[in-house]
């Protein structure tokens, strides 16, 4: 039984606190649980999986199938309950603060595009045209406890890439499927791809960088820029 106001069902609490309380009260140390079960319990909350990962730097030991081969891909093992983040004095335990200035620098450095999939803000995903890209700033190593909030430790990601669980439990392309698409590229495309692989990031052309900046503008302003460019080119 939880204390008054400290029930994981209380939607007035932050998502990380609710996840911690749910793990404490519904799972317990030494027990397994699934991401699906967690999401079903805390519905409508923002980025539940990420908030669970944010408990790790606070001393919570949550193992995946990569740590424990006996687990299924969607299963996790609560090995240890860490700092009681539901208590006011521990609310910020393990959180890695990123200043607005650093966030702006990272977005500008990465050309306002996801470094993992290459999509720019506001673009539609090819495999999900109804979804629009929303950028966020994540840590290069999201599971590293104590990772700093400096620009060199951060990377621009879209919300979909940031939620790594979707890559662990979703449909994965095989090496053969990827290689087939590589071989279909023209020679120039193959060389560009190899350069990106070696740099571990997509090198954007000047036009692509301006496009990414343009996508950051409000809709009304984008229409104005488009109209001005249309007039400039005499279309």
Image (cartoon, helix red, strand yellow):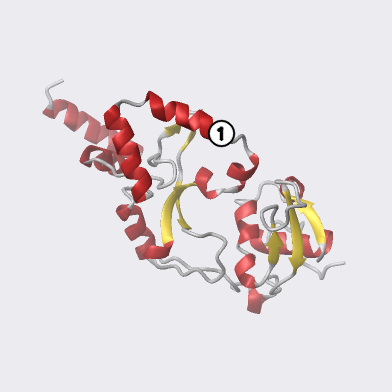
Q: Residue 193: x percent and y percent?
A: 34, 38
Q: Residue 42: x percent and y percent?
A: 72, 51
Left or right? Give the position of 26 relative to 125: right
**Between 209 and 32, the one nearer to me in the picture:** 32
Left or right? Give the position of 154 relative to 174: left
Q: Is residue 217 visible?
A: no
- Which element is circle 1 on? loop
Residue at left offset 44%, top offset 67%: 149
Residue at left offset 83%, top offset 68%: 2
Picture quarter with the C terminus? top left
Picture quarter with the N terminus? bottom right
Identify the image quadrant of residue 234. Answer: top left
Q: Which residue is mark 1?
A: 174
Left or right? Give the position of 214 relative to 153: left
Residue at left offset 12%, top offset 29%: 232
Q: Is residue 38 above or below residue 151?
A: above
Q: Is residue 226 visible?
A: yes
Identify the image quadrant of residue 18. Answer: bottom right
**Between 179 and 138, the one nearer to me in the picture:** 179
């Amino acid at each position: 039984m939880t204390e008054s106001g400290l029930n994981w069902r209380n939607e007035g609490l932050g998502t990380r606190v609710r996840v911690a309380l749910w793990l404490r009260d519904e799972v317990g140390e030494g027990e397994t649980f699934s991401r699906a079960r967690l999401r079903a319990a805390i519905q409508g909350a923002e980025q539940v999986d990420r908030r669970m990962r944010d408990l790790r730097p606070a001393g919570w030991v949550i193992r995946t199938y990569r740590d424990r081969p006996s687990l299924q891909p969607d299963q996790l093992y609560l090995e240890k309950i860490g700092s009681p983040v539901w208590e006011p004095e521990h609310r910020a335990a393990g959180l890695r603060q990123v200043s607005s200035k650093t966030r702006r620098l990272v977005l500008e450095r990465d050309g306002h595009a996801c470094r993992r999939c290459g999509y720019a803000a506001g673009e539609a995903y090819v495999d999900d045209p109804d979804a629009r890209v929303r950028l966020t700033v994540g840590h290069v190593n999201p599971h590293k406890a104590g990772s700093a909030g400096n620009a060199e430790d951060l990377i621009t990601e879209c919300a979909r890439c940031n939620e790594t669980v979707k890559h662990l439990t979703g449909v994965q392309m095989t090496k053969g499927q990827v290689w087939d698409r590589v071989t279909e590229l023209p020679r120039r495309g193959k060389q560009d791809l190899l350069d990106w692989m070696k740099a571990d990031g997509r090198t954007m052309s000047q036009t692509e960088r301006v496009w990414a900046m343009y996508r950051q503008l409000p809709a009304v302003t984008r229409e104005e820029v488009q109209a001005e460019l249309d007039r400039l080119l005499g279309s």
